Amino acid sequence: MSELTQQTEKFFRHFEKYINLSDTLKDELLKRISFRTFKKGELVHDAGKICRYSYFIEKGIFRTYFIKDGKEISEYFCGEGEWVNSPRSFIQRTTDIYYIDAIEHTDAFCLHVNDLVYLFENFPEMERYSRLSMGTIFGHLIERITSLRFTSAKEKYEHFCLTYNDIYSRIPLGMIATYLGITQETLSRIRSEK
Amino acid sequence: MSELTQQTEKFFRHFEKYINLSDTLKDELLKRISFRTFKKGELVHDAGKICRYSYFIEKGIFRTYFIKDGKEISEYFCGEGEWVNSPRSFIQRTTDIYYIDAIEHTDAFCLHVNDLVYLFENFPEMERYSRLSMGTIFGHLIERITSLRFTSAKEKYEHFCLTYNDIYSRIPLGMIATYLGITQETLSRIRSEK
DNA sequence: CCTTGCCTTTGACCTATATCAAAAAATCAT
DNA sequence: ATGATTTTTTGATATAGGTCAAAGGCAAGG
């Protein structure tokens, strides 16, 4: 439990990038999150189901992917200090195409959608946190769109390494290729040439 | 002025897709927006400046673009019933790379960033509106990313026509090409072959 | 109207990356 | 460990779409 306290440091600091955390809100957050560990390769969320939890990664990597023509296509990766869920499924309480799995052993905090709704309804600063943090993610998406439109495979990979600077070396080549929308073979050649 | 009242119908209905608009909030919104018209080709926002207004398009089309190697690259288009601004510039009050211009004669409501901040601070439902409407935009961005990664030039164009169903025919070919990340020549050939 | 300039189309050629196939290397389970 | 499976690398070939160049169309301003 002392370990848990230590871990929530990082969790709280994440919120404090955007809003001030009152003690009451801190308590409410603590009361509502649970801690879980995921084995390498473990399925965190199944596309057939409604995603009712959002996961805050303490340590490790999650991958969101979907299946296209029988192949897994990586949508994005999340390392420590980030929230992961299947966005549309989580927000609209419907099913969606995305699976989530753990690329390596991962420790995460889990927050149920109902608890999040409760927090939104009782802590206006949570709405603000949400609005502001979405702004950050927006920026990443826009950048990715630009990177996809006008760059060669090599530049895409370089951009990827920058974006995922702290975790890119831990992600298998094949997964990176589908994320970038290039083939494994091309990516392998790019890597070997430098 | 009776004309303006008629136009705000559409404006209010946009909010009501996400939240309930109290009469007080309606009044505040009305008090704070101004109406402007833009000529075809007119610059709405200049990259060198801080974007202090957000524009709600009543009629017409705005384009957001940036300059790369001396060429205008279209980032996205907005038709009636949508908000347009230079996101990072508007939110963080810094300069950014994006220009905005009017592709055709456009009528728009303008909301100053200070007024928006006032609304956020005094109407918690505005934070909620913001969070929820951003969710919609998120969906579009994700779709666009997928479309960029795995589709041929032809499919990209078809996806574009679906996404911009109501306005795609009013946008010049060259602008569409840079939006899609393909050359004008390729797009011209795609169009002619069907 | 006729310019002037811009936007779009057409043609010839070239290059980056996909595809297909198979070997080599790494990882996993017994 | 050892064999089995998965992942990555390497090679040969094909192709979608880019580049360069020039001609045709169309629209705005005198």
Image (spheres, coloured by chain):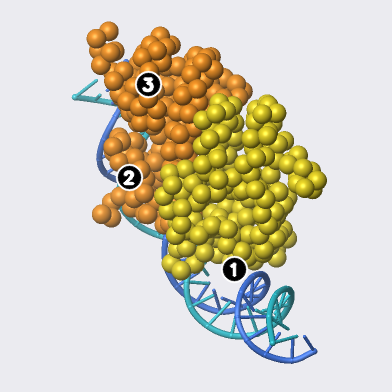
Chain colours: A orange, B yellow, C blue, D cyan
Which x, y percent locates residue B165?
71, 49
- Subunit under mark 1: B
Looking at the rendered structure, whether the residues under marks 3 and 1 are on a common chain is answered as no
User: Looking at the image, is mark 2 or mark 3 nearer the viewer?
Assistant: 3
Nearest the camera: A126 or D6? A126
Q: SS at mark 2?
A: helix
C-alpha gap between disc 2 and disc 1: 32 Å
Tell me which amino acid carries mark 3: Leu
Mark 3, Cα crowd under 10 Å, few <14 / some 14-19 / many 20+, is some
Residue identifier under label 3: A21
Q: SS at mark 3?
A: loop
| Snapshot quadrant of residue D4 | top left
Residue B190 seen: no
Residue A16 seen: yes
Instruction: Tell me which residue sits at (55%, 29%) in the image.
Output: B122
Which x, y percent locates residue A188?
34, 48
Q: SS at mark 1?
A: helix
Tell me which amino acid carries mark 1: Glu
Q: Which disc, if any, is residue B185?
A: 1
The reply to whether discs 2 and 1 touch (Cβ–Cβ < 8 Å) is no
| Snapshot quadrant of residue B141 | top right
In this rendering, is residue D8 above or below A30? below
